[in-house]
Image: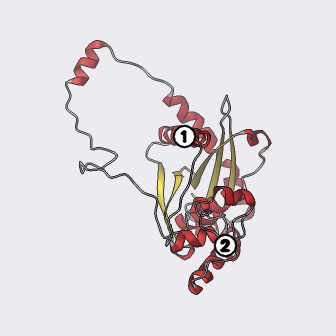
Amino acid sequence: MIRTIKDLEGLSAEEIEAVRKSINMRGYYYMGVKKLGQQEGMTLTEYTAWKAIPADEPCRACHGTGTWKKPERSVGTIHASSAASCVRRLYYDVDASIRPKSVISPELQITFAMGHAIHDVVQKALHAALPGKFADEMTVDLDEAMVLGSHTDGVAEIEQARVLVEIKSIGKEFDTLVKPKDDHITQAVAIYAKALEVPFISFLYVSKSWPHNVKEFVMVYDEKYYRRWWKNKGQVVDLALEKGEPPIADASKDDCGFCPYSYHCPQKL
């Protein structure tokens, strides 16, 4: 079993490729979602007996402490999900001296809700297909990249390998998609896989349109993606922080339109 990036060393390209080709998280998803779809109700007698049983499971939200606090996104760090963003935005994220502000349209709120729902279904399906061998929302810290408190969609322990799973919901682009998007490779390979020492990365793209087909792309960890990100993004932010001056923006006009710091940035397009 190939569990870590170091385990890739000493293996031939043919051996690694054989394992990569054998990874089928898409198949596990369909296996699990089929299980989730098989439901049976109770008879009245069974329901009456169930109601009489006292609650004895700890609250999953508060881990049994009896208290709960709304979680907040980590501050003073680069978030892996936006690691490919404009260097000036990343600088503002780490410097954290100004407040990020966003206005999310009603249309985008629905889009985001659909994405969250799709993630939830896929994660539950992988839990059902791989009981005890799939962990979701694992915390990702990579100090050298200024990443703290990010979360990956999941890590699976299958027979032949340890696999990082990145779930993406996608619209009209689904039909023409033939490989993972560059931003997603930066997020999952350069940051998540490196931080968690995971040798294989499975991208599951789920269509938002009926019948919600799934495409899977499996990659082998390669340090070049982190080095490329560090050269183009991380190092630029690091040097700017040392100087105490925001770097020159490298955003497109679309990036600026969605940037939570556009209200403050003098370089916005």
Residue sitting at x 55%, y 63%: 79
Given residues 151 and 204, the one toward you in this image is 151
Nearest the eye: 94 or 212: 94
What residue is shown with label 2? Answer: 233
* Residue identifier under label 1: 113
Asked whether the viewer can see residue 2, the reply is no
Q: Who is closer to the viewer here, 246 or 155?
A: 246
Percent x, y for residue 221?
65, 63
Farthest bottom residue in view: 243
Amino acid at pointer 1: Ala
Q: Is residue 261 left or right of residue 209?
A: left
In the image, residue 74 sits, relative to residue 207, either above or below, namely: below
Q: Residue at x 75, y 42 (%)?
A: 173
- Residue 43 lies, in percent from the top left, at 32, 13
Q: Does residue 71 sit above or below 95 in this rendering?
A: above
Quarter of the image with the C terminus is bottom right
- How many dots with numbers? 2
What is the quadrant of residue 119 in the picture? Answer: top right
Q: Position of residue 182 (x, y in %)?
A: 72, 58
Q: Position of residue 229 (x, y in %)?
A: 68, 70
- Identity of the amino acid at label 2? Lys
